Image (tube, helix red, strand yellow):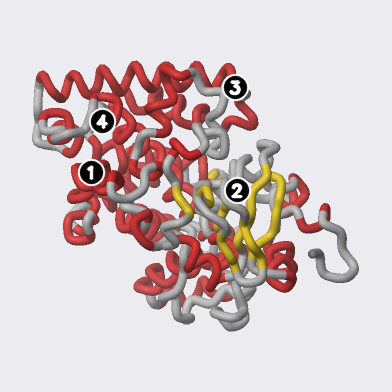
């Protein structure tokens, strides 16, 4: 039920008019209840869980399943994907529940453990400096297109062993495949076909010429994984390992533009970049909504009963601004407690790449802020006219032009 004075239409956090700032809508939804029936941009109905306690519980509720077999991919937005490609975009660890989830996650999890990710810091820092050094000091910089995208794609490519000459082409296809709204179904299907063919060739090359890397190890020692499951694993590692760091960096820079008072502290205490990353993940997470879950039985979420068979979306962005957990949630505060931030989910579906994404974001922001100590929008750019990425699973800007840094 909508709070007094506004209509249900006013409470659509996925409407085009809400993209710039959905947080007042999330606040009104939290005020009205823990879960609400909404219409997704794809035209399907789902329950949106908006309060922190309910979201935290839903993420670990075994009655809410991710298994693609529960809905044949419809709720996940791949209903129109040709059958030959559907296994690549669905038969991966994000879409499978225990006990089968572990057999998909275990073969690729070790390189993403905190200790192993930490060893990559120096290489990632060199990559960041290389891309910043290529930018002219006296020109406007697009944080997204000029820095965050090429930086992130090269970090995950280095981790997975994607050849340098293949990277631009592969990630152009990923950009198309993971952004269906502007691309259209034909372009998405074409991109997925190209990615499927490339990944199969890439895996074959690693089998013929093993190099000890993560994909080579997976390809030569797949255990009981099928060829289709290995292909799906490579696809999801590429796609998810690329997107989140881009918008962690972009959203972090935008937060500093909106809250310039933090710039001096970051200049004098560079270690606060860790806090900047954590607060960006809370304040404006690049992962606003968890992938769809399906209720296997009637489930009570506080005062709401979700019927069996209904789709459920956990709104991480709303949970991270729940005033019941985070005092003054709409304030950007580097010194707050971030222990209960849900941006990387909870339970068995906690993001396996969270440590790499966080490290990539921290190194990227630190490098960028070493040049642009007090970032500001480029001359002539209106904050209200910045364009946001389409879709509900990623929150980030298409471009973020900032002024040249002072000499």
Disc number for residue 185: 3
Q: Quadrant of residue 16?
A: top right
Q: Position of residue 299 (x, y in %)?
A: 56, 61
Q: Quadrant of residue 121?
A: bottom left
Q: Earlier in the sequence, mark 1 or mark 3?
A: 1
Disc number for residue 230: 4
Q: Are marks 4 and 3 in contact (CB under 8 Å)?
A: no
Mark 2 neighbour density, 10 Å: few (under 14) some (14–19) many (20 or more): many
Furthest residue toward right: 5
Can residue 94 be seen by looking at this rendering?
Answer: yes
SS at badge 2: loop
**Label 3 to label 2: alpha-carbon separation:** 25 Å
**Is 208 placed left or right of 362 in the picture?**
left
For the point 33% across and 49% down, the residue is 129
Disc number for residue 103: 1
Q: Position of residue 333 (x, y in %)?
A: 53, 77
Q: Are marks 1 and 3 in contact (CB under 8 Å)?
A: no
SS at badge 1: helix
Can residue 148 be seen by looking at this rendering?
Answer: no
**Is 91 placed left or right of 142 in the picture?**
left
**Label 4 to label 2: alpha-carbon separation:** 30 Å
């Amino acid at each position: 039920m909508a709070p007094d004075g506004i209509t249900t239409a006013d409470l659509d956090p996925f409407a085009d008019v809400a993209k710039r700032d959905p947080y007042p809508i999330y606040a009104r939804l939290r005020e009205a209840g823990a879960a609400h029936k909404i219409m997704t941009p794809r035209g399907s109905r789902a329950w949106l869980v908006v309060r922190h306690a309910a979201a935290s519980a839903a993420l670990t509720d075994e009655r809410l399943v991710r298994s693609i077999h529960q809905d044949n991919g419809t709720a996940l937005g791949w209903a129109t994907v040709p059958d030959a490609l559907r296994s690549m975009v669905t038969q991966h660890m994000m879409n499978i529940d225990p006990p089968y989830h572990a057999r998909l996650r275990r073969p690729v999890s070790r390189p993403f453990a905190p200790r192993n990710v930490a060893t990559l810091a120096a290489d990632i820092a060199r990559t960041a400096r290389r891309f910043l050094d290529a930018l002219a000091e006296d020109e406007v910089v697009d944080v997204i297109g000029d820095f965050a995208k090429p930086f992130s794609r090269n970090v995950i490519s280095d981790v997975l062993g994607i050849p340098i000459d293949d990277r631009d082409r592969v990630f152009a296809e990923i950009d198309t495949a993971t952004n269906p709204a502007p691309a259209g179904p034909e372009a998405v299907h074409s991109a997925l076909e190209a990615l499927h063919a490339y990944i199969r060739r890439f895996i074959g090359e690693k089998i013929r010429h093993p190099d000890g890397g993560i994909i080579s190890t997976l390809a030569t020692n797949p255990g009981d994984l099928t060829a289709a499951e290995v292909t799906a694993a490579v696809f999801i590692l590429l796609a998810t390992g690329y997107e989140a760091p881009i918008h962690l960096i972009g959203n972090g820079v935008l937060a500093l533009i909106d809250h310039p008072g933090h710039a001096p502290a970051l200049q004098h205490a560079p270690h606060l970049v860790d806090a900047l990353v954590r607060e960006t993940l809370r304040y404006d997470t690049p992962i606003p909504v968890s992938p769809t879950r399906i209720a296997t039985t009637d489930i009570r979420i506080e005062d709401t009963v979700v019927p069996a068979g209904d789709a459920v979306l956990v709104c991480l962005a709303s949970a991270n601004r729940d005033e019941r957990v985070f005092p003054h949630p709409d304030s950007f505060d580097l010194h707050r407690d971030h222990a209960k931030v849900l941006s990387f989910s909870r339970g068995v579906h906690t993001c396996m790449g969270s440590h790499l994404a966080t490290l990539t974001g921290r190194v990227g922001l630190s490098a960028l802020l070493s040049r642009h100590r007090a970032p500001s929008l480029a001359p002539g750019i209106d904050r209200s006219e910045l364009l946001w990425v389409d879709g509900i699973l990623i929150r980030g800007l298409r471009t973020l032009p900032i002024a040249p840094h002072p000499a």
